[in-house]
Image: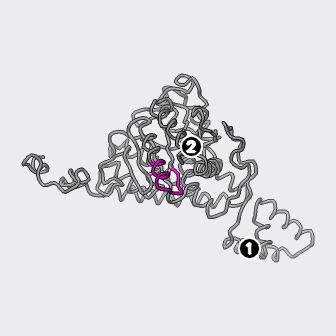
C-alpha cells in the first residue's frame, strides 16, 4: 500500500495521471477509480513523501575537485517548513516597509525581501550548535534563530518586547546561536572567525558562518581573517551574499575580480544560485562538512534585493523598475520553489496559495500586537550596560534627570 501510494502521488503528477488512465482503459467503474484516488490522497498525507530532484545546480568551483551533489531529495515536512518560512520573511519585511512609511519605525532599516532563499537555506543546512553572524540586513536571521515577526517589529519600533528589548533597532538583533547584525561594513567577519576559532579550541563539532555583502568583500579585515582561518584551518564558512549592488554601485564598478568565491587565495570556493533554496541548502550542507574536516570555505551566493539599500534609498536610481520586475517574475525564490513543489507533485497550487494566505494573516496579526506593545521604562537605560545594576552615576540617578 505504501509503495502504491508513494508511486501514485510521488515524484510527479504524471504517475497519478498514468495510473488513472490505465484503470480507465481496463474499464474500471469511474466511481471506484474516484474512491481509489481519494483513498490514496488520504494515505499519502500520513506518509513521508519524498521527491527526487535532478540537476540541482551547476556549481562553479574553485580549488575543489568535487562540489555539492547534483541530485537530492526533499520530503513534504521540509518543503512545507521552507515554503512557510520564506513567505513569513517576505511578508514580515513588506510589513516593516509599510510601517516605516507610516513613521512607526525610524532610523536605519535594511530589508531582505528577495534574498529569502539564502537565509532559509542556511538555517535548514546548519545544526543546533553552529552559529551565524551577518551584517545589518539581519531581520530574517533574527527570526530564523528564535525571533518572531512580533519581536522583530517591536524591536524596530523600540518596544520592550523587541528581540533586543528595544535597544538594538534594525541593525542589532540577536538570538541563540545568532550573534547579530553588525553595523560596521565587514566588521562581523572577524567576529565570526573568532567564533570559528572557539569551536576548534573547544573541540566542538560545529561551524561558524559569516555572511557579508559584495560591497563588503573588499574590506581589508576580511582578507586578514581569511589568512588566519586558513593558517589554522578553522571550521569557518564565509558566505558572500552577492545581491548585485554595493549600495548603488554595480559589481564591475567596485571590484576588479567579481568572482567573489575565488578571492580567498588558498581557501576553496563555490558559486551558488541564491534564488534556488535547494541549491543553497545543498551547498551549505556540503560546506559545513568540508569546513569541519578541512578548514575554511567561501560561498558566493548570487541573489537580488527588491528594496533599495535601505529605506532611504528608493532603489531605482541605479537600476530600472523593469529590471526589478523581471527578477520578481522570473527568478523570485518563492515562485521558483513553489513551482518545484507543484511540478513534482509534492503540493498543489491551491495548497501553496493557502499556506501563503495563512502566513500573511499570522504576520499581520503579530504586527498589530507589536504596535500595541509598551515602551521600555526609563530605568532600562542602564540595563545590560554595566555588570551590576546601577543606581547612581556621578551621584545622580540618570532617569530622574530626563
**Residue 4 percent coordinates (x, y):** 80, 72
**Residue 112 percent coordinates (x, y):** 49, 43
**Location of residue 19 with respect to 232 vertically, above or below:** below
Query: Residue 38: which disc?
Result: 1
In percent of the image, x 53 and y 55: which residue is there? 206
Q: Is the N terminus in the top left, top right, bottom left or bottom right quadrant?
A: bottom right
Q: Is residue 376 left or right of residue 292?
A: left
Bounds of the magenta segment: 195-207
Dot 1 crowding, Cα within 10 Å, few <14, some 14–19, many 20+: few
**Location of residue 18 with respect to 112 vertically, above or below:** below
Camera-side residue: 280 or 362? 280
Instruction: Count up the numbered dots.
Output: 2
In the picture, residue 18 is in which quadrant? Answer: bottom right
Q: Which residue is mark 2?
A: 296
In what element is the residue under mark 2?
loop
In percent of the image, x 74 and y 73: which residue is there? 38
**Location of residue 271 with respect to 10 vertically, above or below:** above
- The stretch drawn in magenta includes residue 198: yes
**Location of residue 244 with respect to 132 vertically, above or below:** above
In percent of the image, x 55 and y 28: which residue is there? 320
Camera-side residue: 13 or 264? 264
Dot 2 crowding, Cα within 10 Å, few <14, some 14–19, many 20+: many
Residue 334 in sight here: no
Main secondary-structure element of the magenta-colored stretch: helix
Amino acid at each position: 500500500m505504501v509503495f502504491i501510494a508513494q508511486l501514485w502521488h510521488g515524484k510527479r503528477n504524471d504517475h497519478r495521471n498514468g495510473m488513472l488512465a490505465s484503470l480507465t482503459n481496463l474499464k474500471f467503474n469511474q466511481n471506484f477509480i474516484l474512491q481509489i484516488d481519494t483513498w490514496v490522497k488520504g494515505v499519502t498525507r500520513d506518509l513521508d513523501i519524498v521527491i527526487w530532484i535532478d540537476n540541482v545546480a551547476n556549481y562553479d568551483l574553485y580549488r575543489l575537485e568535487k562540489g555539492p551533489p547534483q541530485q537530492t531529495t526533499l520530503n513534504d515536512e521540509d518543503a512545507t517548513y521552507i515554503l512557510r518560512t520564506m513567505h513569513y520573511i517576505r511578508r514580515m519585511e513588506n510589513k516593516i516597509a509599510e510601517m516605516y512609511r507610516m513613521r512607526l519605525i525610524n532610523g536605519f532599516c535594511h530589508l531582505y525581501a528577495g534574498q529569502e532563499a539564502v537565509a532559509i537555506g542556511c538555517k535548514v543546512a546548519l545544526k543546533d550548535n553552529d552559529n551565524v553572524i551577518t551584517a545589518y540586513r539581519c531581520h530574517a536571521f533574527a527570526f530564523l534563530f528564535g525571533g518572531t515577526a512580533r519581536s522583530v517589529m517591536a524591536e524596530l519600533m523600540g518596544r520592550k518586547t523587541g528581540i533586543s528589548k528595544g535597544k538594538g533597532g534594525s541593525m542589532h538583533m540577536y538570538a541563540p546561536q545568532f550573534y547579530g547584525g553588525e553595523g560596521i561594513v565587514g566588521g562581523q567577519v572577524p567576529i565570526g572567525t573568532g567564533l570559528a576559532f572557539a569551536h576548534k579550541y573547544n573541540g566542538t563539532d560545529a561551524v561558524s558562518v559569516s555572511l557579508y555583502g559584495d560591497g563588503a568583500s573588499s574590506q581589508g579585515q576580511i582578507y586578514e581573517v581569511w589568512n588566519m582561518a586558513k593558517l589554522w584551518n578553522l571550521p569557518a564558512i564565509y558566505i558572500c551574499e552577492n545581491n548585485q549592488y554595493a549600495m548603488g554601485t554595480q559589481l564591475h564598478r567596485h571590484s576588479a575580480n567579481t568572482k567573489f568565491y575565488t578571492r580567498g587565495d588558498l581557501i576553496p570556493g563555490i558559486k551558488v544560485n541564491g534564488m534556488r533554496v535547494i541549491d543553497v541548502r545543498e551547498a551549505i550542507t556540503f560546506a559545513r562538512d568540508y569546513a569541519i574536516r578541512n578548514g575554511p570555505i567561501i560561498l558566493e551566493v548570487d541573489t537580488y534585493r527588491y528594496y533599495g539599500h535601505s529605506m532611504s534609498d528608493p532603489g531605482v536610481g541605479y537600476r530600472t523598475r523593469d529590471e526589478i520586475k523581471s527578477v520578481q517574475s522570473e527568478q523570485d525564490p518563492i515562485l521558483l520553489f513553489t513551482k518545484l513543489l507543484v511540478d513534482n507533485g509534492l503540493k498543489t497550487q491551491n495548497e501553496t496559495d493557502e499556506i501563503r494566505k495563512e502566513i500573511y494573516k499570522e504576520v499581520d496579526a503579530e504586527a498589530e500586537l507589536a504596535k500595541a506593545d509598551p515602551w521600555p521604562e526609563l530605568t532600562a537605560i542602564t540595563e545590560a550596560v554595566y555588570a551590576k545594576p546601577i543606581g547612581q552615576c556621578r551621584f545622580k540617578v540618570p532617569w530622574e534627570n530626563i
